[in-house]
Image (spheres, grey):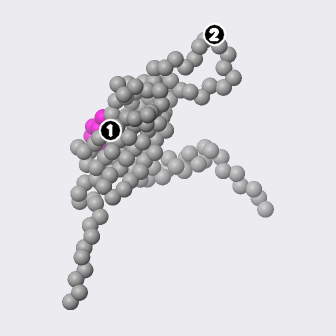
Amino acid sequence: MTNVMIRPNRVSREIDSFFRDFFNHPAFESNSEADFAPRVDIKEDQDKVALIFELPGMEKDDIKVSVKDNVLSVSGERKIECKDENEKYIRSEIRCGFFSRSFTLPKTVDSNSVSADYRNGMLTISLAKREESKPKEIEVKVS
């Protein structure tokens, strides 16, 4: 029997593929000048789609959220000091500097109804669904 090993890169590609299909657009567009890309969870319920970004160590004023031409963009800059040139790092995983992530919104979302909340290093962006895209319950009458 052959052992099958799933590599993290493969899993990452499969997750990206899922979001690409969901939003009918690449889930992640990196800006060539970006220094890092924060992680994001995307969840959906009957009334809204929510994107939750991991942004520890950032101030609210260092984060920009915008919607233009049905594209949600989140960008910012983590300004904390990460590297000291005089110190030797054995491992360095904390990313600092500029980031930018963009998402094409599905047609089910009302791009005029967007709210953002930043708390404890987590940015939550809520996008209300259009009324016509919400599930409707139809009463069945017995005759």
Element assignment for label 1: strand
Instruction: Residue 80 in the image: state x and y as whole percent.
Output: 49, 20
Instruction: Residue 68 in the image: state x and y as whole percent.
Output: 27, 37
In this rendering, the answer to whether 12 lies above or below 121 is below
Instruction: Residue 32 in the image: state x and y as whole percent.
Output: 46, 28
At horizontal 63% and vertical 10% (from top left) the residue drawn is 86
In this rendering, the answer to whether 41 lies above or below 143 is above
Q: Does the magenta stretch include residue 33?
A: no
Residue at which label 1 appears? 116
Element assignment for label 2: loop
Residue occupying the far front of the picture = 120
Residue at which label 2 appears? 86
Camera-nearest residue between 92 and 5: 92
At horizontal 56% and vertical 27% (from top left) the residue drawn is 94
Amino acid marked by disc 2 = Asn
Camera-nearest residue between 56 and 21: 56
Instruction: Kindly report the secondary structure that dominates the magenta region of the rendered protein.
Output: strand
Camera-nearest residue between 21 and 88: 88
At horizontal 23% and vertical 57% (from top left) the residue drawn is 131
Whichever of labels 2 and 1 marks the residue nearer the N terminus, that label is 2
Amino acid marked by disc 1 = Ala
Magenta span = 66-70
Is mark 2 in CB contact (under 8 Å) with mark 1? Answer: no
Which of the 4 image quarters holds residue 77? Answer: top left
